[in-house]
């Protein structure tokens, strides 16, 4: 239903100003991207850029960022990186900066897939964490607007798909001798000389591994 409505909007926009045609194509691309049809999304995004070749810096940032996200989702990481780098350089305004950062999350996820294929599970999880952190940061900053909401939705769906394929991307990770820990959405936390915390964490991990679901007493 939504796709049909967007197609009607595209048809109606064909006789309108170039920036309206470009926006219609970009939103149709976002819908295709959200549905997992990334090749179609790439074509739509490029159609929008052709419709308005003289778009200003702000619209150019949005267009290049969206294209970079779709290219990353398609596994075309070099092209995605170039598009996102170009989007970053002329960015204007807080909303554009947040949007491009969210779109970069798709490049993080592409690198996570490459790491997983190479057998680097820790590297894969690290890249997923970076993508999730971008989403968490954007939501915490509370910078709204339709472009931010669409970019956040696309990244959330992409993260959900990764989590469905790789459930261990959601787990707590603990370093050797509990020297550090990491949870999705935040950077790795180093405990260093905090020996009491390290002993507590080690005890929690051992108990979890030995008896999942068993509460830990205060004297443990």
Image (cartoon, grey):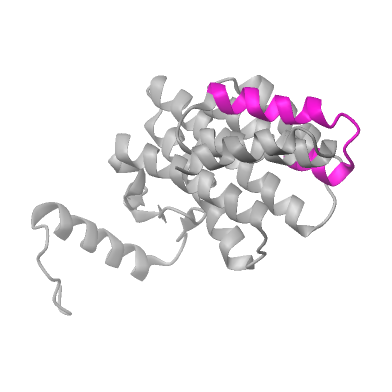
- Of residues 75 and 154, the one drawn nearer to the viewer in this rendering: 154
Q: Is residue 100 left or right of residue 204?
A: right
Name the residue at 74% across, 42% down: 62
* Residue 125 falls in image quadrant: top left
- Of residues 175 and 91, the one drawn nearer to the viewer in this rendering: 91
Name the residue at 40% across, 55% down: 183
Is residue 66 something that shows in the picture? no
Which residue of the protein is positioned furthest toward the bottom in this rendering? 218
Residue 140, position as x, y percentages in the image: 58, 67
Name the residue at 58% across, 28% down: 41
- Of residues 209 and 163, the one drawn nearer to the viewer in this rendering: 163
Residue 83, position as x, y percentages in the image: 73, 29
Q: Which quadrant: the N terminus?
A: top left
Q: Is residue 43 magenta?
A: yes
Residue 186, position as x, y percentages in the image: 50, 57
Per the rendered image, the range of residues in magenta is 39-62
Q: Which quadrant: the C terminus?
A: bottom left
């Amino acid at each position: 239903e939504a796709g049909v409505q967007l197609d009607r909007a595209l048809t109606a926009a064909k006789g309108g100003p170039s920036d309206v045609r470009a926006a219609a194509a970009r939103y149709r691309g976002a819908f295709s991207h959200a549905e997992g049809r990334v090749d179609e999304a790439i074509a739509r995004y490029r159609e929008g850029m052709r419709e308005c070749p003289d778009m200003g810096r702000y619209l150019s940032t949005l267009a290049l960022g969206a294209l970079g996200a779709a290219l990353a989702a398609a596994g075309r990481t070099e092209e995605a990186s170039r598009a996102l780098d170009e989007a970053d350089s002329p960015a204007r305004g807080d909303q554009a900066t947040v949007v491009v950062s969210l779109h970069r999350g798709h490049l993080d996820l592409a690198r996570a897939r490459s790491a997983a294929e190479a057998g680097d599970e820790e590297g894969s999880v690290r890249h997923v964490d970076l993508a999730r952190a971008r989403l968490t940061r954007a939501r915490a900053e509370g910078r709204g607007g339709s472009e931010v909401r669409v970019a956040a939705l696309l990244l959330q769906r992409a993260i959900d798909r990764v989590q469905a394929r790789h459930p261990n991307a959601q787990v707590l990770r603990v370093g050797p001798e509990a020297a550090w820990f990491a949870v999705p959405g935040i950077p790795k936390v180093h405990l260093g000389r905090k020996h009491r915390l390290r002993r507590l964490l080690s005890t929690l991990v051992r108990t979890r591994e030995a008896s999942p679901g068993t509460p830990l007493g205060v004297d443990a």
